[in-house]
Image (cartoon, rainbow, N blue to C red):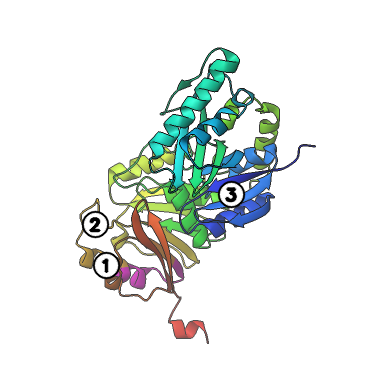
Amino acid sequence: MESNFKMLAKTLYGFESILAKELRNLGASHVKEGVRNVSFEGDTGFMYKANLSLRTALKILKPIKTFKVFNEKQLYRELYNIDWASCFNSSQTFAFDTTMHSDVFNNSLFVSQRSKDALVDKFRDTERQRPSVNTGNPDVRINIHIYNNDCTVSLDSSGASLHQRGYRIATNIAPINEVLAAGLLLHSGWDGRTDFLDPMCGSGTFLIEAAMIACNIPANINRATFAFQNWHDFDDTLYQKIITSRLNQTREFEHQIVGYDKAPSATRKAEENVVNANLSEYIKVERKDFFRTEKESEAKLHLVFNPPYGERLNIDEETFYGKIGDTLKKGYSATDAWMITSNLPALKYVGLRPSRKIKTFNGKLESRLVRYEMYSGSKKAKFN
Protein backbone atom coordinates (compact mmCIF):
# COMPACT_ATOMS: atom_id res chain seq x y z
CA MET A 1 0.00 0.00 0.00
CA GLU A 2 1.41 3.37 -1.01
CA SER A 3 2.26 5.74 1.83
CA ASN A 4 0.80 9.21 2.10
CA PHE A 5 2.74 12.35 1.29
CA LYS A 6 2.25 16.03 1.98
CA MET A 7 0.49 18.27 -0.53
CA LEU A 8 -0.60 21.90 -0.70
CA ALA A 9 -3.86 23.17 -2.17
CA LYS A 10 -3.86 26.85 -3.17
CA THR A 11 -7.08 28.85 -3.00
CA LEU A 12 -8.53 32.38 -2.97
CA TYR A 13 -8.59 34.69 0.03
CA GLY A 14 -11.33 33.75 2.50
CA PHE A 15 -11.90 30.26 1.13
CA GLU A 16 -9.37 28.45 3.33
CA SER A 17 -11.95 27.04 5.75
CA ILE A 18 -14.23 25.91 2.92
CA LEU A 19 -11.36 24.17 1.15
CA ALA A 20 -10.26 22.51 4.39
CA LYS A 21 -13.80 21.16 4.86
CA GLU A 22 -13.83 19.88 1.27
CA LEU A 23 -10.53 18.08 1.85
CA ARG A 24 -11.71 16.47 5.08
CA ASN A 25 -14.92 15.32 3.40
CA LEU A 26 -12.84 13.73 0.61
CA GLY A 27 -10.74 11.87 3.17
CA ALA A 28 -7.56 13.92 3.49
CA SER A 29 -5.47 13.65 6.64
CA HIS A 30 -3.48 16.25 8.58
CA VAL A 31 -5.48 19.13 7.08
CA LYS A 32 -4.10 22.53 8.11
CA GLU A 33 -5.28 25.94 6.96
CA GLY A 34 -2.76 28.56 5.83
CA VAL A 35 -3.10 31.89 4.04
CA ARG A 36 -4.66 31.28 0.61
CA ASN A 37 -3.68 27.63 0.98
CA VAL A 38 -4.42 24.42 2.86
CA SER A 39 -1.84 21.70 3.49
CA PHE A 40 -2.88 18.05 3.75
CA GLU A 41 -1.70 14.50 3.25
CA GLY A 42 -2.89 11.71 0.96
CA ASP A 43 -1.64 9.14 -1.52
CA THR A 44 -1.41 9.30 -5.32
CA GLY A 45 -5.04 8.29 -5.77
CA PHE A 46 -6.10 11.05 -3.42
CA MET A 47 -4.06 13.56 -5.44
CA TYR A 48 -6.01 12.51 -8.53
CA LYS A 49 -9.29 12.73 -6.59
CA ALA A 50 -8.45 16.18 -5.19
CA ASN A 51 -7.77 17.62 -8.64
CA LEU A 52 -10.94 16.08 -10.00
CA SER A 53 -13.25 16.98 -7.13
CA LEU A 54 -12.25 20.09 -5.21
CA ARG A 55 -14.41 23.13 -6.00
CA THR A 56 -12.38 25.82 -4.22
CA ALA A 57 -8.80 24.77 -5.06
CA LEU A 58 -6.74 26.59 -7.70
CA LYS A 59 -3.72 24.24 -7.64
CA ILE A 60 -2.60 21.02 -6.00
CA LEU A 61 1.15 21.07 -5.38
CA LYS A 62 3.30 18.05 -4.46
CA PRO A 63 6.49 19.16 -2.63
CA ILE A 64 9.56 17.16 -3.67
CA LYS A 65 12.32 19.02 -1.82
CA THR A 66 12.73 21.61 0.92
CA PHE A 67 15.98 23.31 1.91
CA LYS A 68 17.54 26.46 3.33
CA VAL A 69 18.83 28.91 0.74
CA PHE A 70 21.20 31.81 1.39
CA ASN A 71 22.61 32.61 -2.07
CA GLU A 72 22.31 31.99 -5.78
CA LYS A 73 24.96 29.26 -5.92
CA GLN A 74 23.24 27.26 -3.20
CA LEU A 75 19.90 27.57 -5.02
CA TYR A 76 21.49 26.26 -8.21
CA ARG A 77 23.22 23.37 -6.41
CA GLU A 78 20.08 22.22 -4.59
CA LEU A 79 18.01 22.34 -7.79
CA TYR A 80 20.73 20.52 -9.73
CA ASN A 81 20.80 17.70 -7.17
CA ILE A 82 17.13 16.82 -7.70
CA ASP A 83 16.58 13.64 -9.73
CA TRP A 84 14.52 15.35 -12.42
CA ALA A 85 14.67 12.34 -14.77
CA SER A 86 12.54 10.39 -12.29
CA CYS A 87 9.77 12.98 -12.75
CA PHE A 88 9.72 13.51 -16.53
CA ASN A 89 11.86 12.97 -19.60
CA SER A 90 13.90 15.18 -21.90
CA SER A 91 11.33 15.07 -24.71
CA GLN A 92 8.79 16.91 -22.53
CA THR A 93 8.49 20.66 -21.96
CA PHE A 94 8.59 22.39 -18.58
CA ALA A 95 8.23 25.75 -16.86
CA PHE A 96 8.98 27.21 -13.44
CA ASP A 97 6.55 29.34 -11.42
CA THR A 98 8.20 31.27 -8.58
CA THR A 99 6.64 33.00 -5.59
CA MET A 100 8.76 34.47 -2.84
CA HIS A 101 9.06 36.73 0.17
CA SER A 102 12.76 36.92 0.86
CA ASP A 103 15.63 39.30 1.60
CA VAL A 104 17.99 36.99 -0.31
CA PHE A 105 16.18 37.21 -3.67
CA ASN A 106 14.10 40.05 -5.03
CA ASN A 107 13.44 38.94 -8.61
CA SER A 108 11.20 35.93 -9.24
CA LEU A 109 12.20 35.80 -12.92
CA PHE A 110 15.85 35.49 -11.92
CA VAL A 111 15.03 32.61 -9.54
CA SER A 112 13.05 30.86 -12.28
CA GLN A 113 15.93 31.36 -14.72
CA ARG A 114 18.57 29.93 -12.37
CA SER A 115 16.25 27.02 -11.53
CA LYS A 116 15.85 26.38 -15.24
CA ASP A 117 19.62 26.42 -15.70
CA ALA A 118 20.09 23.85 -12.93
CA LEU A 119 17.45 21.52 -14.33
CA VAL A 120 18.73 21.74 -17.91
CA ASP A 121 22.34 21.21 -16.84
CA LYS A 122 21.33 18.14 -14.84
CA PHE A 123 19.56 16.61 -17.84
CA ARG A 124 22.51 17.37 -20.12
CA ASP A 125 24.95 15.74 -17.69
CA THR A 126 22.89 12.62 -16.98
CA GLU A 127 20.69 12.13 -20.07
CA ARG A 128 22.86 13.81 -22.77
CA GLN A 129 19.89 15.85 -23.92
CA ARG A 130 17.71 18.55 -22.42
CA PRO A 131 13.98 19.31 -22.24
CA SER A 132 12.63 22.59 -23.62
CA VAL A 133 10.96 25.45 -21.82
CA ASN A 134 7.33 26.22 -22.64
CA THR A 135 5.92 28.95 -20.42
CA GLY A 136 2.50 28.87 -22.08
CA ASN A 137 1.42 25.24 -21.91
CA PRO A 138 4.21 23.03 -20.53
CA ASP A 139 3.94 19.29 -19.98
CA VAL A 140 5.40 19.72 -16.49
CA ARG A 141 5.05 22.79 -14.29
CA ILE A 142 7.36 23.23 -11.29
CA ASN A 143 6.68 25.59 -8.40
CA ILE A 144 9.42 27.35 -6.42
CA HIS A 145 8.34 28.97 -3.15
CA ILE A 146 10.86 30.94 -1.09
CA TYR A 147 9.92 32.41 2.28
CA ASN A 148 12.84 34.11 4.03
CA ASN A 149 15.53 31.39 3.75
CA ASP A 150 13.19 28.43 3.30
CA CYS A 151 12.75 27.08 -0.22
CA THR A 152 10.19 24.48 -1.28
CA VAL A 153 10.27 22.88 -4.72
CA SER A 154 6.98 21.30 -5.80
CA LEU A 155 5.52 19.56 -8.81
CA ASP A 156 2.29 21.25 -9.89
CA SER A 157 -0.11 18.33 -10.30
CA SER A 158 -2.87 20.52 -11.80
CA GLY A 159 -1.18 22.42 -14.61
CA ALA A 160 -3.54 25.17 -15.72
CA SER A 161 -5.46 26.68 -12.80
CA LEU A 162 -8.33 24.49 -11.60
CA HIS A 163 -10.79 27.32 -12.16
CA GLN A 164 -10.53 26.34 -15.83
CA ARG A 165 -13.21 23.69 -15.50
CA GLY A 166 -13.53 22.97 -19.20
CA TYR A 167 -17.21 23.80 -19.66
CA ARG A 168 -17.09 27.55 -20.31
CA ILE A 169 -16.69 28.18 -24.02
CA ALA A 170 -18.38 31.58 -24.07
CA THR A 171 -18.12 34.53 -21.68
CA ASN A 172 -19.74 37.90 -21.16
CA ILE A 173 -18.00 41.20 -20.41
CA ALA A 174 -17.16 40.49 -16.75
CA PRO A 175 -17.29 36.73 -16.13
CA ILE A 176 -16.84 35.46 -12.59
CA ASN A 177 -14.06 32.98 -11.84
CA GLU A 178 -15.42 29.43 -11.45
CA VAL A 179 -13.57 28.78 -8.18
CA LEU A 180 -14.81 32.12 -6.84
CA ALA A 181 -18.37 31.24 -7.87
CA ALA A 182 -18.22 27.83 -6.19
CA GLY A 183 -16.73 29.28 -3.01
CA LEU A 184 -19.38 32.00 -2.82
CA LEU A 185 -22.12 29.41 -3.27
CA LEU A 186 -20.67 27.29 -0.48
CA HIS A 187 -20.28 30.39 1.72
CA SER A 188 -23.97 31.09 1.10
CA GLY A 189 -24.93 27.63 2.36
CA TRP A 190 -26.20 26.37 -1.00
CA ASP A 191 -26.83 22.63 -0.70
CA GLY A 192 -29.35 21.89 -3.45
CA ARG A 193 -32.38 21.60 -1.14
CA THR A 194 -34.39 24.50 -2.61
CA ASP A 195 -34.96 26.25 -5.91
CA PHE A 196 -32.09 28.45 -7.09
CA LEU A 197 -32.06 31.71 -9.08
CA ASP A 198 -29.30 33.85 -10.52
CA PRO A 199 -31.22 36.94 -11.74
CA MET A 200 -28.24 38.43 -13.61
CA CYS A 201 -26.64 35.22 -14.82
CA GLY A 202 -24.26 36.48 -17.51
CA SER A 203 -22.47 33.45 -18.99
CA GLY A 204 -24.04 31.11 -16.43
CA THR A 205 -21.15 30.29 -14.07
CA PHE A 206 -23.22 30.47 -10.86
CA LEU A 207 -25.89 28.29 -12.47
CA ILE A 208 -23.46 25.58 -13.52
CA GLU A 209 -21.51 25.54 -10.26
CA ALA A 210 -24.81 25.45 -8.32
CA ALA A 211 -26.00 22.45 -10.34
CA MET A 212 -22.72 20.61 -9.86
CA ILE A 213 -22.90 21.17 -6.10
CA ALA A 214 -26.55 20.10 -5.96
CA CYS A 215 -25.87 16.92 -7.93
CA ASN A 216 -22.47 16.25 -6.28
CA ILE A 217 -20.81 16.21 -9.70
CA PRO A 218 -16.98 16.46 -9.55
CA ALA A 219 -15.97 20.07 -10.17
CA ASN A 220 -13.46 19.27 -12.92
CA ILE A 221 -15.14 16.34 -14.65
CA ASN A 222 -15.30 18.38 -17.90
CA ARG A 223 -11.62 19.27 -17.84
CA ALA A 224 -9.50 17.72 -20.60
CA THR A 225 -6.17 17.24 -18.81
CA PHE A 226 -4.23 17.59 -15.56
CA ALA A 227 -0.46 17.96 -15.32
CA PHE A 228 -0.07 14.74 -13.32
CA GLN A 229 -1.03 12.81 -16.47
CA ASN A 230 2.39 13.78 -17.91
CA TRP A 231 4.38 12.44 -14.96
CA HIS A 232 6.43 9.23 -15.21
CA ASP A 233 4.45 7.54 -12.46
CA PHE A 234 0.97 8.38 -13.81
CA ASP A 235 -1.38 5.42 -13.25
CA ASP A 236 -4.23 5.70 -15.75
CA THR A 237 -6.00 2.60 -14.43
CA LEU A 238 -6.13 4.14 -10.95
CA TYR A 239 -7.25 7.48 -12.38
CA GLN A 240 -10.14 5.86 -14.28
CA LYS A 241 -11.20 4.07 -11.09
CA ILE A 242 -11.23 7.41 -9.27
CA ILE A 243 -13.42 8.96 -11.98
CA THR A 244 -15.87 6.05 -11.87
CA SER A 245 -16.03 6.15 -8.08
CA ARG A 246 -16.72 9.89 -7.99
CA LEU A 247 -19.42 9.66 -10.67
CA ASN A 248 -21.09 6.87 -8.72
CA GLN A 249 -21.55 9.34 -5.86
CA THR A 250 -23.61 11.84 -7.83
CA ARG A 251 -27.21 12.42 -6.75
CA GLU A 252 -30.47 13.57 -8.29
CA PHE A 253 -31.72 17.13 -7.90
CA GLU A 254 -35.46 17.68 -7.54
CA HIS A 255 -35.70 21.47 -7.59
CA GLN A 256 -35.22 24.18 -10.22
CA ILE A 257 -32.10 26.15 -11.16
CA VAL A 258 -33.00 29.24 -13.21
CA GLY A 259 -30.99 32.10 -14.66
CA TYR A 260 -32.25 35.45 -15.94
CA ASP A 261 -30.43 38.01 -18.04
CA LYS A 262 -31.94 40.83 -20.08
CA ALA A 263 -29.18 40.70 -22.72
CA PRO A 264 -29.86 38.15 -25.48
CA SER A 265 -26.12 37.68 -26.03
CA ALA A 266 -25.69 36.72 -22.36
CA THR A 267 -28.52 34.19 -22.37
CA ARG A 268 -27.13 32.58 -25.53
CA LYS A 269 -23.69 32.27 -23.95
CA ALA A 270 -25.14 30.86 -20.74
CA GLU A 271 -27.16 28.28 -22.67
CA GLU A 272 -24.07 27.23 -24.65
CA ASN A 273 -22.06 26.75 -21.47
CA VAL A 274 -24.86 24.80 -19.79
CA VAL A 275 -25.01 22.45 -22.77
CA ASN A 276 -21.24 22.10 -22.75
CA ALA A 277 -21.39 21.15 -19.05
CA ASN A 278 -24.06 18.50 -19.81
CA LEU A 279 -26.46 20.11 -17.35
CA SER A 280 -29.38 21.15 -19.56
CA GLU A 281 -31.80 18.89 -17.68
CA TYR A 282 -31.18 20.84 -14.46
CA ILE A 283 -30.82 24.47 -15.62
CA LYS A 284 -33.20 26.84 -17.39
CA VAL A 285 -31.99 30.16 -18.81
CA GLU A 286 -34.50 32.91 -19.66
CA ARG A 287 -34.21 36.37 -21.18
CA LYS A 288 -35.74 38.54 -18.46
CA ASP A 289 -35.10 41.85 -16.74
CA PHE A 290 -34.87 40.97 -13.03
CA PHE A 291 -36.40 44.33 -12.11
CA ARG A 292 -39.60 43.31 -13.94
CA THR A 293 -39.91 39.89 -12.31
CA GLU A 294 -41.28 38.37 -9.16
CA LYS A 295 -40.91 34.99 -7.53
CA GLU A 296 -42.76 32.29 -9.43
CA SER A 297 -43.72 30.10 -6.45
CA GLU A 298 -44.18 30.33 -2.70
CA ALA A 299 -41.43 27.78 -2.09
CA LYS A 300 -38.17 28.77 -0.44
CA LEU A 301 -35.71 30.28 -2.94
CA HIS A 302 -31.92 30.57 -2.82
CA LEU A 303 -30.77 33.56 -4.88
CA VAL A 304 -27.12 34.37 -5.67
CA PHE A 305 -25.89 36.96 -8.18
CA ASN A 306 -23.01 39.14 -9.29
CA PRO A 307 -24.41 42.52 -10.37
CA PRO A 308 -22.41 45.14 -12.30
CA TYR A 309 -20.04 47.05 -10.01
CA GLY A 310 -19.54 50.08 -12.24
CA GLU A 311 -15.95 48.99 -12.92
CA ARG A 312 -16.32 47.48 -16.40
CA LEU A 313 -20.05 48.01 -16.93
CA ASN A 314 -21.45 51.52 -16.64
CA ILE A 315 -24.41 51.92 -14.28
CA ASP A 316 -26.14 54.63 -12.29
CA GLU A 317 -25.39 53.02 -8.93
CA GLU A 318 -28.08 54.77 -6.89
CA THR A 319 -30.85 53.81 -9.33
CA PHE A 320 -29.51 50.33 -10.04
CA TYR A 321 -28.88 49.24 -6.45
CA GLY A 322 -32.13 50.86 -5.38
CA LYS A 323 -34.00 48.69 -7.88
CA ILE A 324 -32.30 45.59 -6.48
CA GLY A 325 -33.73 46.35 -3.04
CA ASP A 326 -37.18 47.28 -4.37
CA THR A 327 -37.43 44.12 -6.47
CA LEU A 328 -36.43 41.87 -3.58
CA LYS A 329 -38.88 43.59 -1.18
CA LYS A 330 -41.83 43.57 -3.55
CA GLY A 331 -41.47 40.25 -5.34
CA TYR A 332 -39.17 37.87 -3.49
CA SER A 333 -40.51 36.88 -0.09
CA ALA A 334 -39.19 33.63 1.43
CA THR A 335 -35.89 34.19 -0.35
CA ASP A 336 -32.34 33.90 0.90
CA ALA A 337 -30.67 36.51 -1.36
CA TRP A 338 -26.88 36.76 -1.67
CA MET A 339 -25.01 39.34 -3.73
CA ILE A 340 -21.30 39.97 -4.32
CA THR A 341 -20.14 43.50 -5.09
CA SER A 342 -16.97 45.58 -4.94
CA ASN A 343 -19.02 48.78 -5.01
CA LEU A 344 -19.30 48.97 -1.23
CA PRO A 345 -20.69 52.55 -1.03
CA ALA A 346 -23.56 51.56 -3.35
CA LEU A 347 -24.87 48.98 -0.85
CA LYS A 348 -26.59 51.77 1.07
CA TYR A 349 -28.90 52.31 -1.90
CA VAL A 350 -30.31 48.78 -1.64
CA GLY A 351 -32.34 49.91 1.33
CA LEU A 352 -32.11 46.57 3.12
CA ARG A 353 -30.02 45.62 6.12
CA PRO A 354 -27.72 42.69 5.28
CA SER A 355 -27.68 39.91 7.87
CA ARG A 356 -24.15 38.91 6.86
CA LYS A 357 -21.15 40.48 5.14
CA ILE A 358 -18.22 38.30 4.05
CA LYS A 359 -15.00 39.87 2.79
CA THR A 360 -13.68 38.41 -0.44
CA PHE A 361 -11.95 39.46 -3.66
CA ASN A 362 -13.19 39.35 -7.23
CA GLY A 363 -9.88 39.41 -9.04
CA LYS A 364 -8.04 42.35 -7.47
CA LEU A 365 -11.25 44.06 -6.38
CA GLU A 366 -11.97 43.89 -2.65
CA SER A 367 -15.60 42.83 -2.43
CA ARG A 368 -18.34 41.78 -0.03
CA LEU A 369 -20.70 38.86 -0.25
CA VAL A 370 -23.83 40.17 1.45
CA ARG A 371 -26.94 38.32 2.56
CA TYR A 372 -30.49 39.68 2.57
CA GLU A 373 -33.09 37.49 4.26
CA MET A 374 -36.47 38.11 2.67
CA TYR A 375 -39.14 36.65 4.93
CA SER A 376 -42.68 35.49 4.22
CA GLY A 377 -44.71 38.26 5.79
CA SER A 378 -42.98 40.44 8.34
CA LYS A 379 -39.80 39.51 10.17
CA LYS A 380 -41.65 39.91 13.44
CA ALA A 381 -44.23 37.32 12.37
CA LYS A 382 -41.42 34.99 11.41
CA PHE A 383 -40.30 34.66 15.02
CA ASN A 384 -43.71 34.59 16.71
Of badges 3 and 2, nearer the viewer stands 2
Q: Position of residue 47 (x, y in %)?
A: 64, 40
Q: Identify the disc placed on residue 362.
A: none
Q: Earlier in the sequence, mark 3 or mark 2?
A: 3
Of the two numbered discs 1 and 2 on the same chain, state the one appearing first in sequence.
2
**Kind of element beneath mark 2:** loop
Q: Is residue 334 a member of the stretch shown in magenta? A: yes
Circle on res. 310? 2
185 or 357: nearer the viewer = 357
* Residue 169 vertical position relative to residue 304 in the rendered view, above or below: above
Q: Which residue is mark 3?
A: 215
Instruction: Give the left or right position of residue 247, taking residue 106 as reference.
Output: right
- Distance CA(mark 3)–CA(mark 2): 34 Å
Amino acid under label 3?
Answer: Cys
Q: Nearer the viewer, residue 197 or 72?
A: 72
Report the residue at 30% width, 69% height from top: 347
Q: Nearer the viewer, residue 137 or 212?
A: 137
Q: Quadrant of residue 46?
A: top right
Residue 270, image x, y percentages: 38, 43
Looking at the picture, does residue 240 appear above or below residue 191?
Answer: above
Q: Earlier in the sequence, mark 1 or mark 3?
A: 3
Q: Within the magenta stretch, is there residue 287?
A: no
Is the residue marked by circle 2 packed among few (<14), some (14-19), or many (20+) residues within 10 Å?
Answer: some
